[in-house]
Structures are given as structure tokens and as C-alpha cells.
Amino acid sequence: MKIVLLGVGAVVAAASSSDPELTRKEFAQLVGEWKVIRLEREGRVLGKNEYSLEVMVFRAEDLNKRLRIDPTKSPKWIDEISPQPQQLGPDVPGLYKIEGDRLYYITTFAFKHGDPVRPTDFTTQPGDHRTLVVLERVKK
């Protein structure tokens, strides 16, 4: 099982939102374990045997500069901050939305074709370099 840990504690300080209280409340909704229930890339839903990501964990503790969000944007923005932009490439812009116990998270990976461009919606099409992950909150 592949688990991705995403630090959210430090992101509050790094968030681009002009409303720190709103950002803190938004992170409170993200904190926890989320199970991947669907992964779609460039217009194609991938079968479970085509990817290893099973769980994403958002933690309240400080992992320092892993994510940046702006919940004042519509749709809401989320960026994966590159720890080494020169070697690993630029930050990865994305969007997210929470609907009940579901989290929709879409990013654009286009490093071979220049800097990635933030998606404008939660769809993927052939050749758009987008990946949509649909997650469900793990209840304990």
C-alpha cells in the first residue's frame, strides 16, 4: 500500500489566502486519512492495478512548506510546493473541493511542456496532463 503524507501545519503560514482564519478552518476539514476511490489521468479512469496510491494523509503537524491553499478562490486552489525546484521541477498547481466525506483533488503535470498550468475545473481530457484523484475520508 502506498501512503502519501502531506503536511498541513506549516501551510497555514505559507497559505496564499488573505484570510488566515478561513485557511485554518479549511485545513481542519482536510486533516485526516483519505482513501483513493478513483484516479483519472488525461481523460481516462485508471484501474486499481494501474496505480499504487491508495491513501493520502493530511497531518496537522508541521512538515514545512509541502502545500499551499487558497480557499478564497473559486474553485479552491491547492499547490504542491516543490522542495527542490531546480532538480524536481516547479510547484504543482491544482484545485480541490470537499463534498461531504469526498475530496476531489486535480493537478496538472506538464514539466516536459513548460511550467504546469492550474486546472480551471475538475475534468480531464486526452493530452491535458491533468490527474484527478477522488478520495473518501477514512472513518475511524
Image (cartoon, rainbow, N blue to C red):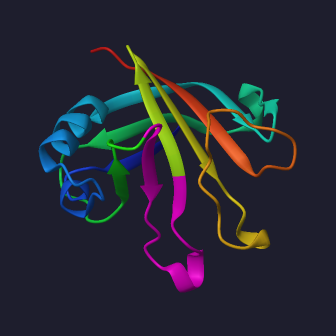
**Tally of numbered tags:** 0
**What percent of the width, then of the height, locates residue 119?**
62, 47
Where's the N terminus, which quadrant? Answer: top right
Please tell me which residue is depicted at 80% across the width and 41% down the height of the picture: 42
User: Is 16 placed left or right of 43 in the picture?
Assistant: left
Along the line of sight, the residue nearer the viewer: 101 or 37: 101
Where 78 sits versus 38, above or below? below
Q: Which residues are magenta?
A: 74-93
Q: Is residue 38 magenta?
A: no
Residue 89, quarter of picture: bottom right
* Front position in the image: 88 or 74: 74
Residue sitting farthest toward the left: 21
Q: Quadrant of the C terminus?
A: top left
List x then y, in percent, for residue 59: 26, 43
Residue shown at 71% from the left, 27% from the top? 48
Q: Is residue 100 above or below residue 111?
A: above
Q: Residue furthest right?
A: 126
Q: Position of residue 82 (x, y in %)?
A: 47, 70
Give the residue at x 72% y 33%.
40
Identity of the residue furthest to the bottom in this view: 86
Q: Where residue 83 sits: x, y (%)?
A: 43, 73
Of 60 and 80, which appears nearest the observer?
80
Instruction: Say above or below: 87 vs 114.
Output: below
In the image, is residue 126 above or below residue 116? Answer: above
Q: Which quadrant of the view contains residue 110?
A: bottom right
Position of 17 compared to 75: left or right? left
